[in-house]
Image (cartoon, rainbow, N blue to C red):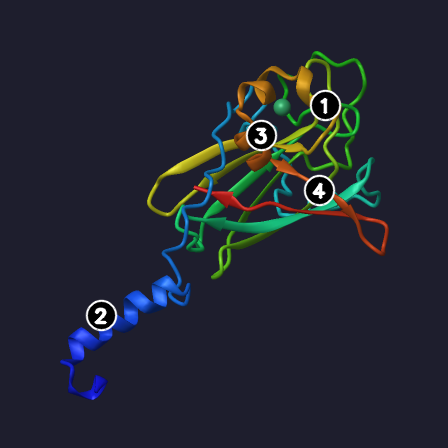
Amino acid sequence: MAASLPRRTLLRILGSAGAFLGLVRPAAAALFPTPPQSTGPFYPPPADRLTDTDWDLVKVAGRVRAAGSEVMHLSGRVLGGDGAPIAGALIEIWQCDANGRYLHSGDVSQTRPRDPDFQGYGVTRTEAQGRYRFRTILPVEYPGRTPHIHARIQRADGSELITQIYLKDHPLNQRDFLFRRLGGAAQAAASITPARRDDGDLEAGFDFVI
Ligand SMILES: [Fe+2]
C-alpha cells in the first residue's frame, strides 16, 4: 500500500513518525558561549615576554629548573557556537607565577621575586580539529583575585575573545569581583576542574566557545 503513495508523501510520513519516535536527531543545541572577561592590567607586552613563548610555560628554554608550583596540563578545543571546531585559531594564555607575579614590568605590587623558571605567557594555534594544549601551573591567588588564567583567542577572520579561566568551587571565587559579576551559567562555563594524573601532574579540559 505504501508503495502506491507518491515518494515525497511517503518521506514526509516517515519523517514525522521518526521525529515522533525520537529517531530523527534534532538540530544541535547552541553551545553556551565562553563569557568575555577583562584583559586585566598584566597582559604581557612584547617587550616583557621571554624569548621562549611556546605552549609549555613550565619549561623556559635555556633553564634547567622547572617552574615552581603544581604542573597542570590544560587542553581542549576552540569551537563555534554550533559546535564546529575552529582550526588555526591563535590562543595566548598568561597567568601569575607561584609567587603571584606576572611577566609584566608594571607588576610591582608584590614584594616576592618573580619565578625565573616560569614562562608566564604562552601562545599556540589550534589544529585541524580545533584542539590545543598548554603545559602550565595550577593558577594561584594573588592579593585581590581568586586563582585564574587569562586567555585571548583570535580567529583567522579577525574576531577575538578575551576571557579568564577559574577553578571550580575555589573558596575565594565568591569573594572575587570579576567572578561574581558572571552569572551562574557563565561561571560554570568559565571554570575548570583539575584532576590528578597517574604521574602526579594535574590535567584539566577547557573548550573555548566563541
Ligand atoms: Fe589576573
Q: Is residue 152 left or right of residue 52?
A: left
- How far apart marks 1 and 2 lie (CA) works out to 64 Å
Cα distance in 3D space between marks 3 and 2: 43 Å
Q: Amino acid at mark 2?
A: Arg
Residue, disc 3: 187
Foreground: 116 or 207? 207
Helix, strand or loop under label 4: strand
The three-letter code of the residue at mark 4 reads: Thr
Answer with the quadrant where ligand 1 appears in the image. top right
Residues at discs 3 and 4 in contact (Cβ within 8 Å)? no
- The numbered dot on residue 12 is 2
Q: Nearer the viewer, mark 4 or mark 1?
A: 4
Q: Which residue is mark 1?
A: 101
Q: Which residue is mark 4?
A: 136
**Residue 46 in view (yes/no):** no
Q: Percent from the top left, x then y, of residue 77?
A: 53, 51
Task: Between label 1 and label 2, give the one nearer the viewer.
Answer: 2
x and y percentages locating residue 62 in the rendered image: 75, 46
